[in-house]
Image (spheres, rainbow, N blue to C red):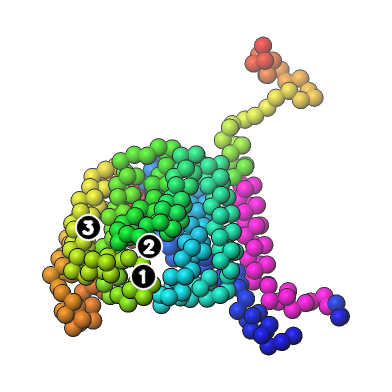
Amino acid sequence: MVLKAEHEIHKRRFSRNMGVGLALVGFAALMFGLSVVKVQSIGAVQGFDHVLRPELLEQSK
Amino acid sequence: MTDANLTDFDNEAGFGDYFALLKPRVMSLVVFTALVGMLVAPTTLHPIEALSAILFIAIGAGASGALNMWWDADIDAVMARTSKRSVPAGKVQPGEALAIGLALSVMSVIMLALATNWLAAGLLAFTIFFYAVIYTMWLKRWTPQNIVIGGAAGAFPPMIGWVAVTGSISVESVLMFALILMWTPPHFWALALFLRKDYDNAGVPMLTVTHGRRITRNHIMIYTVLLAPVAVGLGLTSVGGPVYLAGAILMNLWFVKGAFEIWRRDEDMAEADKYKTEKAFFKFSIFYLFLHFGLILVDLTLRGLGVL
């Protein structure tokens, strides 16, 4: 049996593969957008990291 | 490679055959009514949240369609209207339809909860359960009131849309639910009157088969008369307006008139003109539902423009 780069199953299954691929890409894009919206809806989020943030000192007391 | 194999490959399902499991035409109605339910709600969602909600409601509805096609493949194969569906046509295996239906059901409910709220997700889960289990598996082959029960599943989307935005059920969403619920029986029974042989062959207990066509005509009349106050009443709530109210009154007068004509006729008269009145009533019933929800949007737009 000769291995071919382009097997006939690639052609036969093209519509399925393309459809599933596009659906997954679309889903990932929607999840990303939804995550951004959900995080933004919390409002500005900040905490202490490597640098002291004076504006947070009052809140932490 | 043998010829038999080639034939099998020719019949292999493409993406469209899997997509057809989700009943795209039913889905388009679900998208439309759920969208109206979301748009007329008093509060708003971020557009991406709204887009997600519509998408997951549509996928949930599609998933219940796939479960229906898995369970009903035997009767779909017998009825001319449904014999070309993916499973009876042999393109998609019943097990695949079941797997797709279950996976998409779970996915759509969880995603709707994350995108909006758990009440909307719970309603979606209930709708899927109601359509796939209570209607498809239990009542469809058991009682001639199957259409009434099945109509409830189709009536939930505008309510889910409303709840996705507001987080609560209110009188407007209940009336939108009732509008589709009461509309479904006359719509399908009119279809059953002129597609008589299909349901006879499949042994589905349609009212036309179990109680006869006279009783079916009576039922169409009763449901249409009960539908009218629901449809007009919706116009008196916060989602209604003058355009909807005027349209609803006219359409319901026309619908009741059509039901009255169906009620007045007998089978000989219907056979004589090849079910002309029943077919006209069925066609109008599609416009009826589409226009009711469309006119709600017209009033909403006019309010938004400050005209009303």
The CA span between labels 1 and 2 is 8 Å
Q: Mark 3 — on which chain does it sit? A: B
First-in-chain label (3 vs 1): 1
Name the residue carrying label 3.
B223
Q: Is residue A47 above or below residue B42?
A: above
Name the residue carrying label 1.
B203
Q: Is residue B146 above or below residue B276?
A: above
Magenta region: which residues? A4-33
Q: In the rendering, at what x and y percent does residue B174 appear?
A: 32, 44
Name the residue carrying label 2.
B141
Q: In the rendering, at what x and y percent does residue B267 appear?
A: 18, 77
Taking the spot 45% from the left edge, 54% from the top edge, the residue there is B133
Q: Main secondary structure of the magenta part?
A: helix
Classify mark 2: residues with Cα within 10 Å, few (<14), some (14-19) or many (20+): some
Q: Give whichever of B164, B261 is nearer the camera.
A: B261
Query: Of all residues shown, which one is farthest toward the left?
Result: B264
Classify mark 1: residues with Cα within 10 Å, few (<14), some (14-19) or many (20+): some
